[in-house]
Amino acid sequence: MGRESTHVIETKSRQLFAQMLTEFSSSIVAQGDLLFREISERDYGIDGEVELFHQGEPTGRISKIQIKGTDSAIIPLKREDCVSCKNITKSNIRYCQQRNYPVILVYCSNADKKFYYIDLQSVFHEKIDINSNKESWTIRIPLKKQLMKRKNGK
């Protein structure tokens, strides 16, 4: 059995995000105060976590990261200032609703190296009926929630 294309896309997306976050953390703005840890067991859609530091000291502030990747360019919707990310599953929603940690969705384009992010807990709260027959949801991420990978380290 071969490796599925979705797994290849996910791997590329995680690598791009980790690289972008490392570059940002090394910048004058962040001064090394972000640390990304990849999680190898992804049964619940959590790919890693980001811990915040302040002047090199741990703050105890941690966010879980779920990365959804695509090999296509992410195109904004025509009638809204947002992008659309599909296939957020019941297990993802259940994890977000536990509220122990913020869960940040990072929607990553491997094609144009663009990243969009949103706090999934702010989207889902308690208003999603995970007992319904629906298996997945589509969420909209505002365009202002975009991170771009710097080109050539600039």
Image: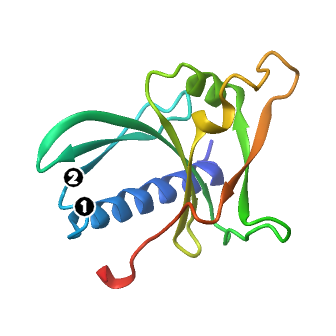
Please give the residue where the numbered disc 2 appears in the rendered image: 33
Q: Residue at x 66, y 55 (%)?
A: 141
Q: In this rendering, is residue 99 above or below 27?
A: above
Q: Residues within 10 Å of mark 2 (few under 14, many from 20)?
A: some
Q: Quadrant of the N terminus?
A: top right
**Is the Cβ of the residue at disc 2 closer than 8 Å to that at disc 1?**
yes
Decide: is 72 above or below 56.
below
> Under tag 2, what secondary structure?
loop
- When the figure is inspected, residue 121 is found, relative to residue 71, above or below; the finding is above
Which amino acid does the dot numbered 2 rest on? Answer: Asp
- On residue 30, the disc is 1
* Residue 130 at x, y percent in the picture: 76, 20
Q: Amino acid at mark 1?
A: Ala
Name the spot of residue 55 as percent of width and height, x first. 12, 51
Residue nearest the viewer, comparing 96 with 151: 96
Q: In screen coordinates, is 29 left or right of 12?
A: left
CA gap, disc 2 and disc 1:
6 Å
- Comparing 143 with 154, the one in front is 143
